[in-house]
Image (spheres, rainbow, N blue to C red):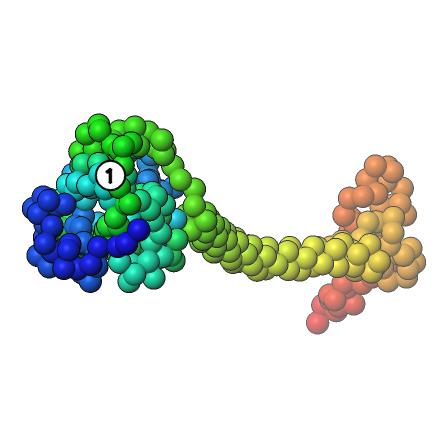
Amino acid sequence: MSFWSSQRLAGQLGGIVNQPGPNAVDCNAITLRIGGEIYITPGVDNPAPNSHTKKNLASAEAFTIPPGQFAFLVTEEKITIPKDAMGFISFKARYKMMGLVNVSGFHVDPGYSGQLTFSVFNAGPAPVHLQQGLQLFLLWLADLDAPSVQHKTKPGLDGISMDVINSITGKVPSIFELEKRIENDVKKLADEDKSLSTRIHEIEKKQNNISIWLGIVITVLIGVLIGVATAYIKDLILPHDKPAAASTSINDRAPPSTSGTTPSASNLGLPADMKSQKEVKAPAALTGNKSPHAGAVNTGK
């Protein structure tokens, strides 16, 4: 088995590749371009992963393969492998270094004719950016010692087969997607914790205000209670000063003097119910008191 050289590839390029791109021969390999159909597995953020399907690309339209996701890429060109040769496929090294891995197989059977479908996986930490028409794939040809009796006779692929898509449809929970989900959950919890801390701070502030006002009210109430209690205790303990009577009853007065004083009602033999009345003046003759004019004697002079 010997691999074809660049000279042989250039000389037989038209029989191997229909409508090859510019500079299609690269050393001893044929470069193939990304075609107009792609399928990329949906991530955990896709709202309807089961309805996700392949996409038709416009000319030079860009797309990305996220970390941890698979993609089916079809070649723009159709190829034909001679019956006395076989093909080996891969893609350029610089995209491998980004983390892109070919998981679709590495050879093309003798007699195959049609487009090639590459199954790739992004094992890198970042999305891989590609576009339609990009010269990504490589095809090597090697001779067999004789034309193979057993070779492909059925037509090859024309676009991405739905059977291929059905085998990998649905959500693919890759490590990177799980890490992203964990980061989102942690961020969500952090936001909830921040919101809760803010609410707790507001509640504590309200509680402090309530405590201040409650302390003021309690202080005022205690002052009022102390004042009332002090006044009550003072009324119980300290003696009261009774006001002097406006007038003294007749019974409470001292007995009248028998000389020179006005007799009381009891001395005059008045009824007992009159004791409370005011004193009655007796005639001057009874009291022995002389009128200021009593001593005056008319001498007839």
- Horizontal placement of 231 versus 14: left or right? right
> Which one is nearer the viewer's eye here, 156 or 244?
156
> Which one is nearer the viewer's eye here, 63 or 45?
63
> Which secondary structure, mark 1?
loop
Quadrant of the image containing the C terminus: bottom right
The spot of residue 251 in percent (x, y) is: 87, 48
Q: Residue at x 28, y 62 (%)?
A: 94
CA neighbours of label 1 inside 10 A, class few (<14), some (14 to 19), many (20+)? some
Q: Quadrant of residue 96?
A: bottom left
- Horizontal placement of 269 versus 276: left or right? right
Q: Quadrant of residue 44?
A: top left
Q: Residue at x 17, y 33 (%)?
A: 158
As drawn, 271 above or below 191: above
> Which one is nearer the viewer's eye here, 142 or 274?
142
Name the outermost residue toward the front.
146
The spot of residue 120 in percent (x, y) is: 32, 47
According to the image, label 1 marks what residue? Answer: 147
Q: Is residue 254 visible?
A: yes
- Horizontal placement of 257 versus 84: left or right? right
Q: Amino acid at mark 1?
A: Pro
As drawn, 152 above or below 139: above
As drawn, 129 above or below 116: below
The spot of residue 206 in percent (x, y) is: 51, 55
Q: Is residue 285 visible?
A: no
The spot of residue 73 in percent (x, y) is: 24, 43
Q: Residue at x 26, y 50 (%)?
A: 142
